[in-house]
């Protein structure tokens, strides 16, 4: 293991932040035990130029900054011979590179991009499609839009490389309906790329043909789920498909093998080609390689998007460090963090997780890690029972009611459930109605258990992961803030008893329709 | 439109079937590795199919044998286990007692919680264990039912589906007695006029999409869809358009709840009062298998009955609704002799005497190709006695490429195989007319046709010495009859038809015929017996079994051995 990794492990063995004694104040005390750790900071790979003054989305600007050079080089690359004498075509070799780079999907599930590509059915005789998922709809997430609006050619270069590596002749960018300007800019960029022979017939004289089209969604979160997206692209209602049998790698768009990757993932492909897989894998931490763009929002002084090496920055640093969130609002204390978009399970301030880490002797040993010291990566957050999802960190301070916050989220999921499968269709609205009641004076003592009962009957029983997305916030909010939910219900019940009626007659039934 | 899958031709040596061994509720079951999917194509056998073969029916709503699988209702979720494999040797890991170690399915992110699989879409794998009744399975089922019921109007007392409703049935078998639901239910449109024959109650709809898939993938008319989102989802026809294809009523059959109702049947009858009789549709040569629903000799509905070789699970709307004439008040009820009401015994005695006088070559018979094969056979026997010319009346329309055949007679092939017509159906009719005109033909027997519409006008009929007519409804021909013998609709008797593809199918009696009307085969066997020395059996089975001995195409058949789906005969 390289030294970066060792440092990372060391940092886990210590704690660097504690929240000021509960209730005594907002001061954050920093205890840096390991002084050799560099100041946590951004590392801009994808967003290297995007925010530079004068940098624009036109191809001239991109070319001036070395754009499409990687593509030119890659398309001319010879095949590769392995030590065992096996010959790989340039495409095969590059697919292998993406795998060894360790790149994991940035859309939500964090699945290995190279592995996903390796599942593609290349023997079916059917065309292989690639779709860029630019539906960016996970609440709290605003990273893909930076790329789409400020540097569309970087995405296109990543897509052409990915398509070339996978023998794709036709690709789509599925962009959410709420990004009309993004769609316009993409279409312009695609036209520019065609003009310059980076796209279209006989790309750069290599004989390789590729077309990319932009498809605009009509404003539904479920269109970001890859099989719902495919249905939508086919002109149908975005009803996610059952898996088995409809794994996109085998039966995707028009029932042909299809790759669906997130905008940020596809941009990384370009950087893997440019810097080589080994160099890319040196960024971030093992199994959590490269950089990722974190969308930081909520009750921090300095919300925004920050590109960081995966796992090199902790949640605490993202919230409190000068280079990122710059702490909470004056006089406030941290209450909770949603670490990976609204669908991820909430983390409670002060939680401590027992994570397995490799000790000095190479053995896996359990280590207690306070929530704020969780490295912001895929594996640590998974071990902490949640996920880094779309990379959206939503911070909540003690001014927030968890009941109100959850009611808000539940309303979102009730509105966005596609309604195809029973548990999610009925359960999402049921939870929203219960929470509406609980936040409008109609609460009951048993509502915390009631909500948990519904959510438990959704998760794991639905066609797509929206079921988990809707259930997890409820399960985690209620479990971790049980007393708050309980108290709210009890207060309402007491008020009703005092008023002498069992039901709250002022309560308007919840409906978003 | 997609064609109906037909049974594979029988081969002498069946190929060896690859099998997979699984356990269903602890019992070992060996099942084929592949089984036909909704289109009849072999696909990996699903857990639901394997359980069925093991004698366990897993409750389901959205799954239908003949429709594409979508897996949306989640009712068929079950807990399952798979053998643990040693990753190095790729061999199953064994328990101490030598049995394979089984890992129960759990949620990947919550290993303590069982994970169900939808059995309708999940293929089996070797050694898989299906726990169709485990506590975890039951809990999943109860939860799905609870979700389905929270917004359901529960208007069973006025619902046409009551008694054959899967929501009622599963709630009794698999549901829980109470729900925790304390919110206001979602309200949706009720009594939506979906099309000329269908009403929709969106509140009762469980959104299984069976109706949508049927009309798109089977009927080839992408007429229905879902509007709105989430819990507010509703089935609807395209705005401004009606759901109006000739197969629309099949959606009422496959709707597992009372959301889709037939305007024809709505609020008319509680289904548990209906007697069900296996019969056939007589409106075209396809011969769709049906179930007649009747109560006290009144027919209330036709529904399709499964037959993979004929109509799959479907029938057309025009055939389905073509039953009202059977109960028409002007049905022929009385035996008539020269315009006077008579009795069967008197009329038949007189008719015997009249026929006994008829010289060879002076008789002609026109037998409708909607009579049963047995009746046509008896008519042919009669014809042979007089050297009579025989024919049927062709009746055609446009074939629709799905079920409806161009031939609108239901027994054209039966009439051909029994020898009533040959060459071109109807070609003899002008010759018979000419024979009447020249006085050669003095006696005409007409069964089930109004010949005045096919070239034998009323003046020709009036010139006959003897006109024998059997029919069900009055016509110009029945009015001219010297001997009027009231017959039966197919629903009122037993018999067989041979469809356009050569499938001989039998049908049973659902209701009594009105008045004195009698099945034609009964009095025909009397008539034939009066003239020929061989004894004609007094039962339909006997007539049938005698017929198959005489007609080569039917050889080997036996009434008792013809199953519900008929038998193929060479055409
Ligand atoms: C309800 C739901 C919504 C999703 N929305 C998005 C989205 O907006 N953008 C996205 O890239 N992935 C989204 N995903 C994840 C995609 O299904 C898919 O995993 C991803 O696009 C794959 O790309 P990646 O491997 O590059 O991450 C969503 C998943 C679910 C279940
Ligand atoms: S889980 Fe929800 S969003 Fe996904 S298919 Fe089912 S109803 Fe639709
Ligand atoms: S109307 Fe009936 S068949 Fe159609 S989706 Fe609703 S429940 Fe299913
Ligand atoms: S297709 Fe023919 S046999 Fe079938 S229901 Fe329609 S009319 Fe009757
Ligand atoms: S029967 Fe509906 S999900 Fe399987």
Image (cartoon, rainbow, N blue to C red):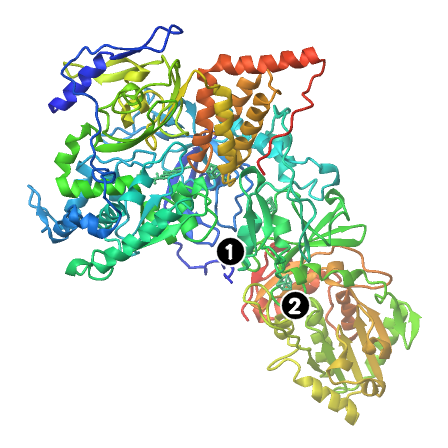
Q: Chain of mark 2?
A: B
Q: Mark 2 = which residue?
A: B410
Do callouts 2 and 1 mark residues in contact (Cβ within 8 Å)?
no
Q: Position of residue A499 (x, y in %)?
A: 70, 13
The C terminus of chain B lies in quadrant: bottom right
- In-front residue for pair A96/A53: A53
Q: Picture quarter containing residue B186?
A: top right
Disc tally is 2
Q: Picture quarter containing residue A334?
A: top left
Q: Position of residue B474 (x, y in %)?
A: 83, 72
Q: Which callout, 2 or 1, points at the residue further toward the start of the chain?
A: 1
Report the residue that reaches farthest toward the front. Answer: A54
Mark 1: give few (<14), some (14-19) or many (20+) Cα within 10 Å. Answer: some
Mark 2: give few (<14), some (14-19) or many (20+) Cα within 10 Å. Answer: many
Q: Mark 1 = which residue?
A: B217
Q: Is residue A174 visible?
A: no
Report the residue that reaches farthest toward the bottom. Answer: B438
- The circle drawn on residue B130 is none
Q: Chain of mark 1?
A: B
Mark 2 C-beta to ligand 4 under 8 Å: yes
Give the side of residue A456 with respect to residue B540, left or right.
Answer: left
Q: Picture quarter containing residue B455?
A: bottom right
**In the displayed structure, would residue A270 be above or below residue A398?**
below
Q: Are marks 2 and 1 on the same chain?
A: yes
Ligand 1 placement by image quarter: top left
Q: Secondary structure at mark 1?
A: helix
- In-front residue for pair A271/B430: A271
Q: Secondary structure at mark 2?
A: loop
């Amino acid at each position: 293991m390289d030294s970066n990794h060792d440092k990372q492990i060391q940092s886990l063995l210590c704690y660097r932040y504690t929240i000021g004694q509960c209730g005594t104040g907002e001061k954050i005390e920093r205890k840096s035990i390991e002084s050799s750790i560099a100041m946590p900071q951004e590392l801009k790979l994808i967003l290297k130029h995007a925010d530079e003054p004068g940098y624009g989305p036109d191809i001239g600007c991109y070319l001036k900054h070395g754009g499409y050079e990687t593509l030119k080089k890659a398309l001319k690359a010879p095949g590769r011979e392995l030590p065992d004498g096996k010959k790989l075509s340039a495409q095969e070799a590059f697919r292998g590179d993406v795998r060894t780079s360790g790149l994991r999907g940035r859309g939500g599930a964090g699945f290995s991009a190279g592995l996903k590509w390796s599942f593609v059915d290349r023997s079916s005789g059917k065309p292989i499609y690639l779709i860029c998922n630019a539906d960016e709809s996970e609440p709290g997430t605003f990273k893909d839009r930076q790329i789409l609006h400020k540097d569309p050619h970087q995405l296109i270069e990543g897509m052409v490389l990915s398509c070339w590596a996978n023998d794709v002749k036709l690709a789509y960018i599925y962009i959410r309906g709420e990004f009309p300007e993004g769609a316009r800019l993409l279409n312009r960029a695609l036209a520019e790329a065609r003009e310059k022979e980076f796209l279209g017939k006989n790309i750069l004289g290599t004989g390789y043909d590729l077309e990319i089209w932009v498809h605009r969604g009509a404003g539904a979160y479920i269109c970001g789920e890859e099989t719902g997206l495919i249905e939508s692209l086919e002109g149908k209602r975005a009803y996610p498909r059952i898996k088995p049998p409809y794994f996109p790698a085998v039966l995707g768009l028009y029932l042909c093998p299809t790759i669906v990757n997130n905008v940020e993932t596809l941009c990384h492909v370009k950087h893997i080609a440019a810097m080589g897989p080994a160099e890319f894998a040196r960024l971030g931490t093992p199994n959590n390689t490269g950089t990722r763009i974190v969308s930081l929002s909520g009750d921090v002084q300095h919300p925004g998007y920050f590109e960081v090496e995966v796992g090199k920055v902790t949640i605490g640093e993202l919230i409190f460090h000068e280079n990122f969130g710059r702490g909470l609002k004056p006089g406030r204390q941290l209450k909770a963090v949603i670490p990976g978009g609204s669908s991820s399970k909430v983390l409670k301030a002060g939680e401590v997780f027992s994570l397995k880490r490799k000790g000095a002797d190479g053995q896996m040993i359990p280590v207690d890690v306070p929530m704020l010291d969780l490295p912001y990566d895929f594996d640590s957050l998974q071990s902490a029972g949640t996920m880094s999802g779309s990379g959206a960190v939503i911070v909540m301070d003690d001014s927030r009611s968890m009941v109100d916050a959850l009611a808000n989220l539940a309303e979102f999921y009730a509105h966005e459930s596609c309604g195809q499968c029973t548990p999610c269709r009925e359960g999402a609205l049921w939870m929203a109605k219960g929470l509406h009641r609980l936040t409008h004076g109609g609460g009951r003592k048993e509502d915390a258990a009631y909500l948990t009962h519904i959510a438990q009957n959704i998760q794991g029983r639905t066609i797509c992961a929206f079921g988990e997305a809707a259930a997890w916030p409820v399960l985690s909010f209620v479990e971790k803030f049980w007393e708050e939910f309980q108290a709210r219900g009890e207060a309402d019940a007491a008020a009703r008893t005092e008023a002498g009626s069992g039901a709250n007659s002022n309560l308007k039934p919840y409906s978003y329709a | 439109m997609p064609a109906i899958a037909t049974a594979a031709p029988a081969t002498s040596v069946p190929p060896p079937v690859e099998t997979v061994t699984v356990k269903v509720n602890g019992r070992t079951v060996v099942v084929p590795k592949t089984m036909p999917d909704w289109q009849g194509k072999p696909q990996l056998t699903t857990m639901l199919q394997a359980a069925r073969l093991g004698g366990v029916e897993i409750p389901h709503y959205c799954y239908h044998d003949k429709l594409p699988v979508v897996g949306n209702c989640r009712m068929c979720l079950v807990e399952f286990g798979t053998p643990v494999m040693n990753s190095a040797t790729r061999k199953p890991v064994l328990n101490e007692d030598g049995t394979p170690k089984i890992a129960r399915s759990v949620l990947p992110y919550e290993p303590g919680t069982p994970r169900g699989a939808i059995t309708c879409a999940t293929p089996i794998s070797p050694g898989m264990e299906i726990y169709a009744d485990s506590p975890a399975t039951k809990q999943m089922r109860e939860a799905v039912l609870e979700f389905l019921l929270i917004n359901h109007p529960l208007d069973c007392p006025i619902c046409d589906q009551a008694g054959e409703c899967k929501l009622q049935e599963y709630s009794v078998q698999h549901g829980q007695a109470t729900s925790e639901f304390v919110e206001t239910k979602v309200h949706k449109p009720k009594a939506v006029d979906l099309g000329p024959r269908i009403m929709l109650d969106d509140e009762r709809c469980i959104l299984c999409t069976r109706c949508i898939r049927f009309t798109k993938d089977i009927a080839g008319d992408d007429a229905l869809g879902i509007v709105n989102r989430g819990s507010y989802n509703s089935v609807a026809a395209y705005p401004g358009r009606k759901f109006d294809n000739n197969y629309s009523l099949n959606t009422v059959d496959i709707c597992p709840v009372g959301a889709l109702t037939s305007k024809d049947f709505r609020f008319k009858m509680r289904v548990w009062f209906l007697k069900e009789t296996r019969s056939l549709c007589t409106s075209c040569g396809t011969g769709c298998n049906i179930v007649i629903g009747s109560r006290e000799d009144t027919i209330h509905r036709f529904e399709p009955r499964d037959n993979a070789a004929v109509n799959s699970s479907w029938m057309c709307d025009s055939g389905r609704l073509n039953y009202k004439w059977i109960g028409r008040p002007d049905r022929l009820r009385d035996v008539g002799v020269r315009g006077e009401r008579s009795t069967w015994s008197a009329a038949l005695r007189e008719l015997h005497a009249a026929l006994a006088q008829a010289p060879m070559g002076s008789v002609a018979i026109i037998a409708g190709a909607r009579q049963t094969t047995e009746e046509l056979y008896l008519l042919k026997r009669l014809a042979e006695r007089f050297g009579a010319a025989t024919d049927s009346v062709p009746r055609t329309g446009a074939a629709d490429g799905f079920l409806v055949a161009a031939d609108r007679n239901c027994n054209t092939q039966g009439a051909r195989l029994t020898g009533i017509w040959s060459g071109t159906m109807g070609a003899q009719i002008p010759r018979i007319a000419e024979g009447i005109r020249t006085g050669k033909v003095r006696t005409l027997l007409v069964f089930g046709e109004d010949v005045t519409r096919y070239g034998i006008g009323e003046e020709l009929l009036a010139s006959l010495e003897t006109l024998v007519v059997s029919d069900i409804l009055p016509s110009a021909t029945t009015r001219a009859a010297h001997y009027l013998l009231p017959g039966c609709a197919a629903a009122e008797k037993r018999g067989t038809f041979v469809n356009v593809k050569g499938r001989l199918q039998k049908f049973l009696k659902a209701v009594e015929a009105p008045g004195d009307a009698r099945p034609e085969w009964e009095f025909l066997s009397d008539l034939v017996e009066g003239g020929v020395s061989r004894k004609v059996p007094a039962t339909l089975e006997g007539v049938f079994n005698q017929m198959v001995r005489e007609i080569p195409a039917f050889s080997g058949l036996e009434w008792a051995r013809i199953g519900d789906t008929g038998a193929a005969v060479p055409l």
